[in-house]
Image (tube, rainbow, N blue to C red):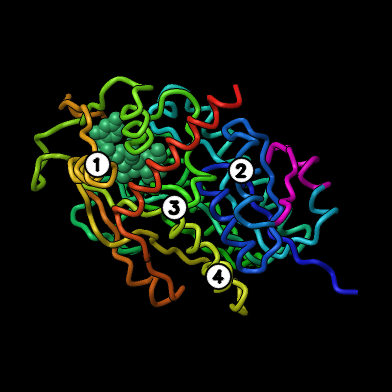
Amino acid sequence: MNQIEYILITGGAGYIGSHTVVELIQHGKTPVIVDDFRNADPKILRGVEEISGNQVICERVDVCDETAMRVLFERYHFTGIIHFAAYKAVGESVDEPLKYYSNNLNSLLVCLALTEEFKVENFLFSSSCTVYGQPEKSPVTEESPIIEAKAPYGATKQMCERILSDFVKSGANIKVLNLRYFNPIGAHPSGKIGELPSGKPNNLLPYLTQSALGILEELTVYGNDYNTLDGTCLRDFIHVCDLANAHVKGLDWLENQQEALNEIVNVGTGNGSSVLEIIHTFEKVANRSLKWKFGPRRSGDVEQIFADVTKAKKLLKWSAQKTLEDAVRDAWNWEQKWRNETIDTN
Ligand code: UD1
């Protein structure tokens, strides 16, 4: 009897997780989402099912709960894990460091202990360009220096990468791929899934689209005196569907490797765009003007960072396909659709 090969997706109901689940299903994989919905909305799963035309398997479990997780490893034959589940708000991590260290480190440790026990060989980790801090120059390659993180959030990503590296060095029979994400934005073009920050968003795009709808006050652009062309910060904004696709390519690549390994790959577009460029792109694709103002710099912000994506192209045969306009248009489409439907059903 052929055993079904499942892919465990921790945090699979979240923003990047849900888009990755769609991509995986469309590529013939069978994902099992593990999410306790502390930072996700169960309605997103309906969107995933509508897009993929498949029922999704979802287990409501806290990834830090090793006993509950072991039950899942006994129930499903996992051949790979994509570990998204983590807290990610930089400011909150400064105020509540223990919450971040406890959740982000323990969830990884639980997953790794179980990979060993159940001999799961392929492991993909959600890392971040935050590990580079403010680099001396961009684009940053995977060899660019790691600078000690200022905020606990970034420190957890650095520590998790270190744990994975030490685990592989110890002789564990596991193939690890760390994907260092740049700034994911946008939503599925269908408008059925997208970013759903809980409470007031910290990130630029959800703040912008919510302020355009009048849900939030006008957008403040943090700082206009940076050493960039227009004085505002520069980031590598990547469409979330491109990022999701990088996971499918990454998993395929891992599955084709024969030996234990630990690799790191940047996932970005290779282009830097400023905060003002995002505003102008929004005004163009939404065909309306946005109310915004300049404010002081946000503490802890890096001035500019964008990715060198040579390794992603070479190793994973992956590169971003969508434009900045696509991403901003999809984010706007999603925000309007979600708000309309939420109002309709309440
Ligand atoms: C940071 C991390 C990223 C992490 C993410 C999690 C870096 C380089 N990036 O993203 O790895 O995954 O947090 O949340 O450390 N902005 C405004 N007004 C706003 C909101 C944002 O001007 O209301 C500006 C910010 O100052 C920044 C840019 O928009 O220049 C992007 O900000 P944001 O979306 O919060 O992402 P990062 O801080 O780059």
User: Callout 2, which amino acid?
Assistant: Ala
**Residue 91 image offset from top left, x and y in percent:** 38, 28
Question: Which residue was labeled with disc 3?
Answer: 240
* Quarter location, residue 46: top right
**Residue stretch rendered in magenta on the structure:** 54-71
> Any mark on residue 287, and which?
1
Rendered-image quadrant of the C terminus: top right
- Which of the image's four quarters has the N terminus? bottom right
Q: Cβ–Cβ below 8 Å for labels 1 and 2?
A: no
Residue hosting label 4: 261
User: Residue shown at 57%/61% (left/top)?
Assistant: 23
The answer to whether one can see residue 300 in this image is no
Cα distance between the residues tagged 4 and 3: 26 Å
- Pointer 2 residue: 13
Q: From the viewer's perspective, is the residue at label 3 or at label 1 nearer?
A: 1
Mark 2 packing: few (<14 Cα in 10 Å), some, or many (20+)?
many
